[in-house]
Image (cartoon, rainbow, N blue to C red):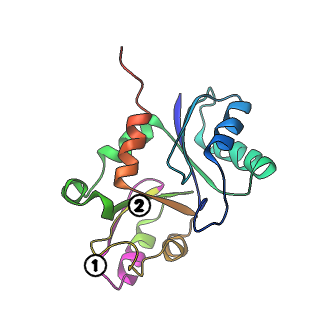
């Protein structure tokens, strides 16, 4: 099966530095195949015989802590990823302004009440819509100036998370699609 693994909070402002060649080498050493990375923010596409994203997350977190650094992983199968793309509730924004649309991947599914509480706490024009173990977020005025921070999202939704903008989500979907001959 093809999987996408996202690392949380690496290579940001000189902290938690991980080189992509070292990350690819770790994945290959662990027996994963067709390992590819995208960008420096910790996006890995790979093949595995293991059929549990949760099991892969635990293994990758343990091995990465031993060999590189401690971080959270968010693993989704290629099929799950295609569902995330297909279920995007912000289709117009995805075309018009994909840089201001993000998906925050979470360790567990957010409850409807937690998502409603998060939306009510937002002071700006941001909009949050839940998915399964992720949330779609529109930042119409930009992410950098928003008060809707990752810390606030994690606190309100009660789960660790990592975000990717829509352009990255689509590029990872493309990387996780088997080549047609």
Q: Residue furthest right?
A: 66
In the picture shown, does residue 115 fall above or below 95? below
Q: Quadrant of residue 122?
A: bottom left
For the point 50% across and 70% down, which residue is it? 157
In the picture shown, does residue 32 fall above or below 38? above
Q: Position of residue 77 (x, y in %)?
A: 50, 37
Q: Is residue 55 visible?
A: no
For the point 56% across and 50% down, which residue is it? 42
- In terms of depth relative to the viewer, which is nearer, 97 or 4? 97
Distance Cα–Cα, label 2 vs label 1: 16 Å
Q: Does the magenta segment cover residue 26?
A: no
Which type of secondary structure does the marked residue at label 2 adopt?
A: strand
Q: Which residues are magenta?
A: 116-133
Q: Position of residue 49 (x, y in %)?
A: 62, 26
Count residues near mark 2 (Cα–Cα under 10 Å), then give few for <14, some for 14-19, many for 20+.
many
- In terms of depth relative to the viewer, which is nearer, 124 or 69? 69
Eye-nearest disc, 2 or 1? 1
Q: Are marks 2 and 1 in contact (CB under 8 Å)?
A: no
Q: Earlier in the sequence, mark 2 or mark 1?
A: 1
- In terms of depth relative to the viewer, which is nearer, 61 or 24? 24
Q: Which residue is mark 2?
A: 135
- In terms of depth relative to the viewer, which is nearer, 27 or 115? 27
Which type of secondary structure does the marked residue at label 1 adopt?
A: loop
Q: Which residue is mark 1?
A: 125
Total marks placed: 2
Q: Position of residue 145 (x, y in %)?
A: 38, 80
């Amino acid at each position: 099966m093809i999987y996408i693994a996202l690392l949380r909070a690496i290579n940001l402002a000189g902290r938690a530095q991980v080189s992509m060649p070292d990350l690819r080498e770790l994945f290959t050493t662990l027996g994963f195949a067709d390992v590819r990375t995208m960008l420096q923010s910790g996006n890995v596409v790979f093949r595995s015989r293991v059929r549990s994203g949760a099991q892969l997350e635990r293994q990758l977190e343990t091995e990465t802590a031993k060999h590189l650094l401690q971080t959270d992983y968010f693993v989704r199968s290629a099929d799950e990823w295609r569902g995330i793309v297909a279920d995007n509730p912000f289709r117009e924004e995805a075309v018009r302004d994909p840089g201001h649309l993000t998906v925050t991947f979470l360790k567990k599914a957010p409850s409807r009440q937690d998502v409603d509480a998060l939306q009510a706490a937002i002071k700006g024009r941001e909009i949050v819509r839940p998915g399964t173990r992720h949330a779609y977020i529109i930042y119409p005025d930009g992410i950098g100036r928003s008060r809707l921070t990752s810390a606030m999202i994690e606190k309100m939704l009660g789960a660790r998370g990592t975000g990717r903008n829509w352009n990255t989500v689509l590029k990872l979907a493309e990387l996780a699609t088997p080549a047609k001959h």
